[in-house]
Amino acid sequence: MDHYNIQTLLPVARTRNVSQAAEQLNLSQSAVSKRLKMLEQELGILLFERVRGNKSFSLTPSGESFVEIAERWLAVWRETQSLQYRSPNLFLSIGSLDSLNYAFLPRLYQSLARHEPQLNLKVVTSHSRELYDLVDRREVDVAFTLLRREQPSVTVEQCFAEEVVGLRLAHPDVPAGTSVHPRELAPEDELYVDWGPSVQMWHDQWWDPGCPERIFLDTAQLIFSFFFHPRQWAIVPLSVARRAELTGRYRIFRFAVGQPDRICYKITHKYPKTGTVESLRIVDRYLRELLQEPS
């Protein structure tokens, strides 16, 4: 089979649209259609059915089955092509959220750098939904996200749960460890970051999610650029709060009512590249050790 035809099939299967797939592949629509027709002729099966009156396609049952085979075939082909460049070193691309790269995963990276010098790491910071797409396209080998999402090519497993706490500027009138009821915290003073569905649902039970004065931030580290008044507060994971508290500028407080943990998920491709299997095993081993350490 021609790998170019296989590479053309997968975007069409994902988008169900030739024009969108052609744009992703930087090809003309006619070139995409020609490659699909050649692949169907080579296989002797019909992969797609055009939806009448619509520009989209639907996969036939045979097409659905072949897509999984095609993903594995293309992964093996890429690994075969890279053999000539293979060195004794191992390679792995890790994707993660900003908050995990800031306060949790550095310990994993340090352990790998210290004890596994043959493992070459590439670390990518992105948002949860984008991390799924990166894993799906095999641009990232393993990723850590707060979102659980069903995606046929991606394997999802819960990695750990972490307590969320309150954070505010250190102030003489506010002793460390103070327990605060949500009703004592004004929504307009919040620096808001989305910590996943469970925390967000709890949050919206106590504070108006549409408060116009609230500052919405998309990364954890931005919080520290916006703190300037003792009334301001933020909900953050405990690992982020502890690292901030070490600066002496911030204080941690707990909530007087129970709140859910933020849940972190580890995601990998259902059919990982053969050259990364050993690297993934190494990372899993150090990750288990990290999670067993006292918090």
Image: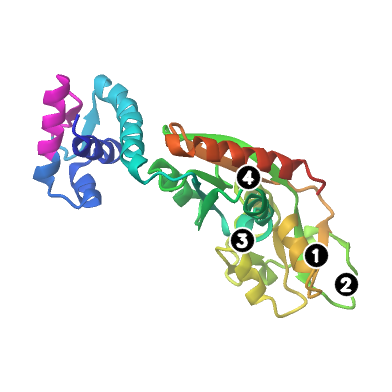
Q: Earlier in the sequence, mark 4 or mark 2?
A: 2
Residue 259: x %, y % from top left: 75, 48
Question: How many angstroms separate mark 1 from mark 3 (CA)?
Answer: 19 Å
6 relative to 198 in the view: left or right: left
Q: Amino acid at mark 2?
A: Val
Number of residues whose C-alpha sits closer than 10 Å to that of mark 3, classed few (under 14), some (14–19) or many (20 or more)? some
Q: Amino acid at mark 1?
A: Glu
Q: Nearer the viewer, mark 1 or mark 2?
A: 2
Question: How many angstroms separate mark 3 from mark 2 (CA)?
Answer: 23 Å
150 relative to 161 in the view: left or right: left
Residue situated in front as seen by the camera: 294 or 168 = 294
Q: Residue at x 89, y 78 (%)?
A: 172
Q: Which residues are magenta?
A: 33-52
User: Circle 2 — which element?
Assistant: loop
Number of residues whose C-alpha sits closer than 10 Å to that of mark 1, classed few (under 14), some (14–19) or many (20 or more)? few
From this view, report whether residue 277 is shown above or below residue 169: above
Question: How many angstroms separate mark 4 from mark 2 (CA)?
Answer: 31 Å
- For label 1, the residue is 184
Q: Which circle marks residue 174 in the picture?
A: 2
Number of residues whose C-alpha sits closer than 10 Å to that of mark 2, classed few (under 14), some (14–19) or many (20 or more)? some
Marks 4,3: beta carbons within 8 A: no
41 relative to 116 in the view: left or right: left
Give the quadrant of residue 103.
bottom right
Q: Amino acid at mark 3?
A: Val
Is residue 42 rendered magenta in the image? yes
